[in-house]
Image (cartoon, grey):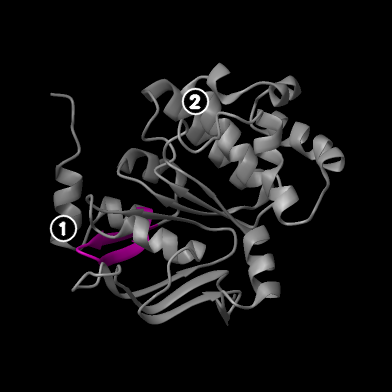
Amino acid sequence: MTPVLELTGVAARYRGARTDVVSGISLAVRPGESLALVGESGAGKTTLLRLLLGLARPTAGEVRFDGAPLAPRDREQMRRFRRGVQCVFQDPYSSLDPRRRVGAIVAEPLRSLGLDSRASAAPKVAAALEGVGLPADAAERYPHEFSGGQRQRIAIARATVCDPRVLLADEPVSALDVTTRVKVVELLAELKRERGLTLVMVSHDLSVVASLCERTAVLEHGRIVEQGTTAQVLGAPGHPYTRRLLDSVPRLP
């Protein structure tokens, strides 16, 4: 099966930097699977997510979408890519424009991709909000009228309103309290199961990874040191760095 997203020998370096942020990365994401990227802060997880989103370009290697090299100047390919790959960001407070009503925020991908007008987008927006457990009248309200968990549900509705094939999530529950975190994880699992979504998630929370992701890749200093099924990687880690990550998880005495 052709991977929907693939990194082959990828390296990336930020402008003005003398060393690569990530290097030698080879990673395949197959349709319908869920993959976690884990590691300490600064390991390169978010940079990999930016590469997969097409927001950063590699200095070496190749990013592929449906088996073809991702070409930012190919307008037709990028239109298919933007419709097929959407993202949920970490902070539900800063990722939503406070000046716009929720309906306009959720409809933004439909309008920017030319899929719907404002009028024809309304039923899809209502369905997307209902799909994440929010009432349709939420569309008429502003982000500040919602809690953090509800805002993240709005962000997920925005990301899924155009029926993407892939959802990339950057620490989607780290800014939420424990109870809300569980509910959002359950929502992501439900959306994945019902829609057949492919999920790539950056997370520090190994319990979230264990409950949501089938595969895990562990990054240390910009390199993948271990990858495989989550049960293998977290249950019987083969690399010392992975073992240190697991040992650092707080446990009740």
Which image quadrant is residue 135 in? Answer: top right
- The x, y position of residue 37, in whole percent, is 36, 56
Near-viewer residue (72 or 100)? 100
Which image quadrant is residue 12 in? Answer: bottom left
Q: Is residue 123 magenta?
A: no
Crowding around mark 1 (Cα neighbors within 10 Å: few <14, some 14 to 19, many 20+) is: some
- Report the span colored magenta: 216-230
Q: In which quarter of the image is the C terminus?
A: top left
- The x, y position of residue 73, in whole percent, is 60, 77
Q: What residue type is labelled 2?
A: Gly
Q: What residue type is labelled 1?
A: Tyr
- The x, y position of residue 151, in whole percent, is 54, 28
Of tags 2 and 1, the one toward the viewer is 2
Distance between the alpha carbons at the discs numbered 2 and 1? 32 Å
Q: Which residue is drawn at 44% across and 40% down?
A: 172
Q: Residue at x 27, y 65 (%)?
A: 226
Closer to the N terminus: mark 2 or mark 1? 2
Q: Mark 2 points at which residue?
A: 149
Q: In which quarter of the image is the N terminus?
A: bottom right
Horizontal side, residue 179 vs residue 150: left or right: left
**Label annotation for residue 241:** 1
SS for callout 2: helix
Q: Residue at x 48, y 73 (%)?
A: 6
Q: Residue at x 50, y 62 (%)?
A: 53
Q: Is residue 218 magenta?
A: yes
